[in-house]
Amino acid sequence: MIRDAALVAAKDLRLELRARVGMGQVLPFAVLVLLLFAFALDPDRGVLERATPGLFWVGVLFSSVLVLQRSFGVEAEDGILDALRLSGMAPAAIFLGKVAALVVQLAVLEVVLGVGVVVFYDAQPAHAPLLLSVAATATLSIAAAGSVYGALSARLRSRDTLLPMLLLPLLAPVLISATRGFEVGLEGHAGGGWSWVALLGVFATLYLALGAFLFRPLLEDA
Amino acid sequence: MIRTRPNPPKNFPSTGSTYRRRCLVPDVGATVPLGRSAGRVDGPDRPPALAPIVRLRSAVALLGRFPALAGVDLDVGRGEILLLRGPNGAGKTTLLRVCAGLVPVTSGTATVLGEDLVRDRTAVRRRVGLLGHATHLYQDLTVAENVSFWARASGSTVEEGRAALERLGVARRLWDLPVHALSAGQRRRTSFAAMVCRRPELWLLDEPHAGLDREGRDIVDGLMVEAASVGATVVFASHELDRATGVAHRSVTVEGGVVQGGLLAGDAVPAGRGS
């Protein structure tokens, strides 16, 4: 299973390197969202500083929808879902491979957005271990939940609009927890922040288990 | 009635033994001798103890609520090349997809490669190769990357994928091109290579000659004949009857979701049903 998951992850990352959709479209979109928030809130600098964690994660969530649409859109083209079903790879391995590739792509996105909030919003990462832990668990949650709903909507003609409508409400708890965790991390008081990491860890575990269990029927129905 | 195996096409590609062993010999265990002569697969010489590779009885398959297959009776023997004839919309593609385990059988019985498709249609999938109208290729990956991925995904090696590409006549200079830059014919050959390198025991081909030039068609015909000669089974649908009937051992007509003449000689017809 690990071999198949690594194969799928490597294929997805190679696809991204070839097509450069993330680099060419998603990253500029994410930076643009940050800039627009800065333009809208800059007159009241205090509001911008207080809203930084939320704006960061809203930017990540919106951008992740684009990454997910691309990731599952290519699987829906030209009979590839059939080929995946015929390949003999375990559906759970395909799911884990997709999640792994998404985690890498979202991590790159978050690094860029992280630099963006430091530059544009004057954010100061006071407690890096907490911030990194929040980012890691939240990213895993987004990738796992996104893969479940990405597969669900893959073959639907309305997938471009359906995916964000299904996914964003589901990720609201992740958005809240990651935002609270980042607030604590930016303030430098790590103590209360680890409970948010633990909660995000529960979300990530839940979505991963759900995805590994559900991916076979999702692949069949896709 | 099964006809005598025809001679291979004039441009039958060379049958390198390494390729034969790596890419065409299915994992069929010790019950079937490998590399048997072409004549062995004809009806009269088929070992009587072997059950048909494909056995459908009164099989019904629905697409939505439409009965794309409306009670199919069909047997296909090991090493046989079976041609499915019939007009558009007759159910040929659905029949191939049922045999691949992609479309459920809602009533009747269906056994493919010993697997009961009614009970579990996933087990047979890794043992069949399906080439349909879609290419099953990632447009942004190169030819070599695509074939390598599908080879490894099915447990074959990268070398087997490359051997298949060479066998399909995909020029090496094209291997590093993304698939979207290829012509339709080269995409078809690449797609065929990705299927062949999986070493399927049952080849399910939907219009395998479509989009190919004469050389490519000859290669495909040669591969079908060679696959059957080493014990794989080929079921293909084609509208190019002149070419297809020259390759097939037997042909059946699919029309209105049923197969006419789908049973092998001597097989019992279910009570109350015609064949």
Image (cartoon, rainbow, N blue to C red):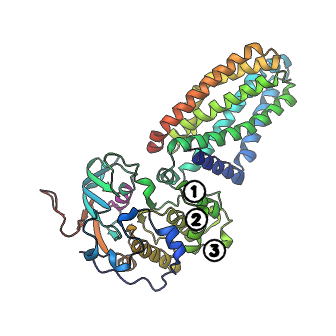
At horizontal 41% and vertical 48% (from top left) the residue drawn is: B122
Image mark 1: chain: B
Query: Going by the image, does B10 lie left or right of A45?
Result: left
At horizontal 61% and vertical 65% (from top left) the residue drawn is: B159
Residue placed most toward the observer, B254 or B161: B161
Distance from label 3 to label 1 (Cα)?
Answer: 21 Å
Q: Which residue is mark 3?
A: B171
Image mark 2: chain: B
Tag 2 and tag 3, C-beta contact below 8 Å: no
Residue A4 on image: x %, y % = 57, 48
Q: Which residue is mark 2?
A: B161
Which mark is nearer the camera, 2 or 3?
Answer: 2
At horizontal 35% and vertical 75% (from top left) the residue drawn is: B248
Residue B69 on image: x %, y % = 29, 55
Q: Residues within 10 Å of mark 1 (few under 14, many from 20)?
A: many
Query: Going by the image, does B209 lie left or right of A10?
Result: left
Image mark 3: chain: B
Q: Are marks 3 and 1 on the same chain?
A: yes
Q: Which residues are magenta?
A: B88-97
The disc at residue B152 is 1
